[in-house]
Amino acid sequence: MLKLLRRRVANEAGFTLMELLVVVLIVGVLAAVAVPLYLGYVRDARLAEGKALGGNALTAAQACAQQNSGSTAAAANANATANCTLAQIAQRIGVDPATGNTPDGRWSVGIGAGAEIALNSTTNLFSRGPIMITGLIAPVDNMATGMYIVGGIPRMRCTLDSANAALDPANANSGTTC
């Protein structure tokens, strides 16, 4: 019995070439499908970081405008607008008030024309903007998000275009809905 077992083990040579090729083929197909999906998830996560920063900036602008609406100039007029500068918004979201850059240097927060964003204290609608978030360094250097003011309501737009990594502050239809 022991001789039979030794002879059988000696005849076993391992995997055949065909079995190895099938395994390599299966691994290659899985990699071809999984890698693009993974890269898409990574890109979406990075863009979500920019969108979250834009949302935080919008919330900070609303809070700043509400706080500024209690000033004597705004209190004198029921429909007065409360203005907030980039420095006031930056202070609330933890970016450098002078440059608008995040502490890690990956994103830049900016405000469009007039360097202020305005909120009507009565209607709670924005009258000036937009808030622009732009990626500065790789891997987010081709990404941008913008909070445009359309009819007093902010609308978020995004771009991932490497040829035009910035949204047009004057065009609320630049980029894509995100």
Image (spheres, rainbow, N blue to C red):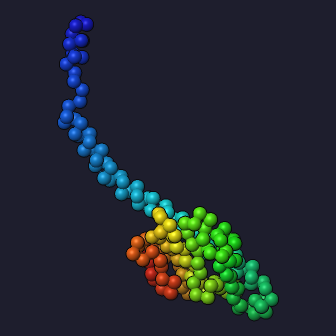
Residue at (60% x, 71% y) in the render: 101
The number of numbered badges drawn on the structure is 0
Q: Position of residue 133 (x, y in %)?
A: 54, 74
Q: Position of residue 167 (x, y in %)?
A: 48, 79
Q: In which quarter of the view is residue 83 placed?
A: bottom right
Residue at (25% x, 44% y) in the render: 25
Q: Is residue 28 above or below residue 36?
A: above
Q: Position of residue 12 (x, y in %)?
A: 22, 21
Q: Is residue 144 visible?
A: yes
Q: In which quarter of the view is residue 122 placed?
A: bottom right
Q: Is residue 145 above or below residue 29?
A: below
Looking at the figure, which quarter contains the N terminus?
Answer: top left
Q: Is residue 62 visible?
A: no
Q: In which quarter of the view is residue 37 placed?
A: bottom left
Residue at (52% x, 73% y) in the render: 134
Q: Position of residue 89 (x, y in %)?
A: 67, 75
Say whether residue 125 is left or right of residue 162: right
Q: Viewer-proximal residue, 35 or 178? A: 35
Q: Viewer-proximal residue, 87 or 126? A: 87
Q: Residue furthest right?
A: 72
Q: Residue furthest bottom?
A: 77
